[in-house]
Image (tube, helix red, strand yellow):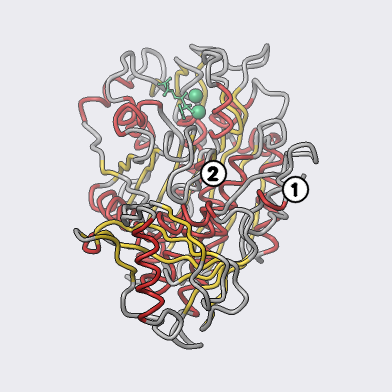
Amino acid sequence: MTAVADRSLGPELVRTESIGEADVLVIGLTSADDGPVIAPADAFNDVLDADTRAALVAALRAVGAKGKPEELTRIPAPAGLGVDSVLAVGLGPAEKVDAEQIRKSAGVAGRALTGTGTAVTTLSGLDLGAAAEGFYLGAYQFTAFRSAKSAPKPGDQPVGRVEFLVPDAGFGVEALFRAQAVAEAVATARDFVNTPPNALFPAEFANRAAELAKAAGLQVEILDENELETQGYGGILGVGKGSSRPPRLIRITYAGGDKKVALIGKGITFDTGGISIKPAANMENMTSDMGGAAAVIATTLLAARLSLPVTVTATVPMAENMPSATAQRPGDVLVQYGGTTVEVLNTDAEGRLILADAIVRAGEDEPDYIIDVATLTGAQMVALGTRTPGVMGTDAFRDRVARISQGVGENAWAMPLPTELRADLNSKIADLANVAAHRWGGMLSAALFLKEFVPESVQWAHLDVAGPAYNTGGPFGYIGKGGTGVPVRTLIATLEDIAAE
Ligand code: BES
Ligand code: MN
Ligand code: ZN
């Protein structure tokens, strides 16, 4: 079961100028007061002539299609079109159609195409890249742990191939290349998150990440528990010492340019809470507590694949937070990498302890930017719900990352770091306590803890993706159950923005 290294690829994505051998044609429908309208209206007229469009709209109207966002309507194809059926997917009102709507609509279409061999689509006439990302991500399945007893039968497998209609052979080469690379990186992050915690423990996670990085020609360094000890990584060691499976710190570097960006991701392969143990209900979801690590590893590989002119170093602490006779206790004081002492009042606030070590280590490289990503607090979901990441940090960079995230549909929202909350992290005996004695502003308080370890004058953004990294509900848009891959697309878009400075 090598789900991550050998991820069975999703649909093949290709450009085409004709309908060819496809089984299904996927078209977009916007909603107007007098009924659904095929979108784009003015493209691919040699494939869809005026009579065919009129016949399609009449048939779709007859079965109740309105063109509402993500509405799906399937009809037999009009004679002569060359496909068996037409799948119409709603886009909502024409004036509101943006890249994210196209991505979502393509996502539900991609999911509805399960069991189909080849689909061809005109959604590429609206936004080829967004459509390709949507189809690929909507079709994503994680089946590495199904035996023949429950493995998907051919009719339950993802669509094999999606063809994107283009006006000419040269159109959209770059856009499709980027979309495929981005979608595969999101799928890589999802695979890591979806791999169960018995199979993905720190050493295994580090090895799998190293394998992918080496295959991409990147520099890799792994510190094992002995090296962590020698070098004084007290936060990672303190969190990891309750587990029989020792912690790791992996560093992956893609050297692409002068600007240096440090990415840091929380890699708790399972979070029981430790001695401050969590309730049993829903504890299984804590397999997702390495979602930040998965995202920054996938993004670093993606930056290399896209040859971005920036240098990216991922610094990823990995540990399993377990209760045991060797576990750290509430009240223990540990020494973070760099010397800061921390009183561990709650062993379930472990993410900030491993991140603090990683942030200090990343700071030694003197990066221009530090972005850390973590499934850090339940308070993130209390504040913003399960789909909206919180972003905190230095003001200008925080706002920039939030804006970029909103532009790619991951929708991170800027949150403050109120100075008055900092004093609540004072400890009676150490430099800092790892939690405040109250629960107010829990997401902000966690970020204020991290801020203590961020070098002055570095632009910093901290993304709390506790809810957004893992979907415990049903599928929506291009997101299925389980790992979502958030915030890979925010991170890559931020790196592209920095590269373009
Ligand atoms: N991994 C959790 C945060 C989390 C909760 C992520 C739910 C995803 C879903 C984190 O380590 C944690 O336990 N945080 C505590 C902090 C508290 C002890 C200050 C929390 O949020 O309860
Ligand atoms: Mn925890
Ligand atoms: Zn955690």
Q: Dot 1: what SS? A: loop
Drawn side of residue 431 relative to residue 109, left or right: left
**Disc assigned to residue 198:** none
Q: In this view, does 472 lie above or below 30?
A: above
Q: Mark 2 points at which residue?
A: 293
Amino acid bearing label 1: Thr
Quadrant of the image occupied by residue 167:
bottom left
Q: Looking at the image, is mark 2 or mark 1 earlier in the sequence?
A: 1
Q: Is residue 338 visible?
A: no
Q: Residues within 10 Å of mark 2 (few under 14, many from 20)?
A: many
Count of residue discs: 2
> Depth check: 19 or 130 in front?
19
Q: Is residue 474 above or below residue 27?
A: above
Mark 2–mark 1 Cα distance, whole angstroms, equals 18 Å
Q: Do the residues labelled 2 and 1 touch (CB within 8 Å)?
A: no
> Depth check: 74 or 498 in front?
74
Residue at the image position 71 percent from the left and 30 percent from the top: 198
Residue at the image position 47 percent from the left and 18 percent from the top: 344
Q: Quadrant of the N terminus?
A: top right
Q: Can residue 328 be seen in this view?
A: yes
Looking at the picture, how far across and down is residue 87, in whole percent?
A: 47, 61
Drawn side of residue 114 relative to residue 496, left or right: right
Residue at the image position 38 percent from the left and 60 percent from the top: 60
Looking at the picture, how far across and down is residue 177, in whole percent?
A: 52, 73
Q: Mark 1 points at which residue?
A: 2
Ligand 1 rendered quadrant: top left
**For the residue with label 1, is its CB less than 8 Å from the closest atom of ligand 3?**
no
